[in-house]
Amino acid sequence: MPIARKPSVRLLPLALLLAASCAQAGWVPVVRDADTKSTAVSTYMDPKSLSRKGDYVSVRVLINFSERSEEGIASAIGIDEFDCMNDRLRSRSSAGYAEPFGKGRLIREFQSVGAWTRIIEGTVTEALFENACDFYPQWWSE
């Protein structure tokens, strides 16, 4: 069953996301008030990277962690793929870096496609899903 969309999302509208992307080298913040994990990470997306392949939409995502992991990872950049018709996502790739915003030494990289997981309501992942899927709104009604 599709998740209900709630207006309690604190996101920049897509037009502002696109405009802001030029000022921030492509990365714009994505925030979800209800996500308790959002204080441990800062999440960004690159609206210029949105692309559609068949039934799926993908986007580049950046996560800055408030503390480095035991391996020394301060940030991660990945490509997430969304199945907009079935409310789910999977990771296509991910890379962990020693400095925020994908800077510094590359510490770990994954190039394998992950398993599909359901979008959890009230999370930053739901906000990413909504932004990615709303980029092609006319397509979902065909």
Image (cartoon, rainbow, N blue to C red):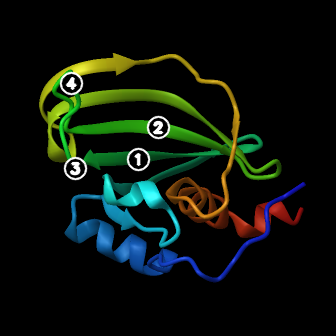
Residue at (22, 65) in percent of width and height: 24
Q: CA distance from mark 4 to mark 2?
A: 23 Å
Residue at (50, 62) in percent of width and height: 35
Q: Which x, y percent locates residue 7? A: 64, 83
The amino acid at mark 1 is Val
Nearer-N-terminus badge (2/1): 1
Q: CA distance from mark 4 to mark 1?
A: 22 Å
The amino acid at mark 4 is Glu
Please tell me whether residue 47 is drawn above or below residue 55 in the rendered image: below
Near mark 3 (Cα within 10 A), the count class, few <14, some 14-19 or many ≥20, is: some
- State left or right for residue 30 relative to residue 22: right
Residue 91 picture quarter: top right
Residue picked out by circle 2: 79
Please tell me whether residue 61 is drawn above or below residue 18 in the rendered image: above
Q: CA distance from mark 3 to mark 1?
A: 16 Å
Residue picked out by circle 3: 66
Residue picked out by circle 4: 70
SS type, badge 1 = strand
- State left or right for residue 87 relative to residue 105: right
Nearer-N-terminus badge (4/2): 4
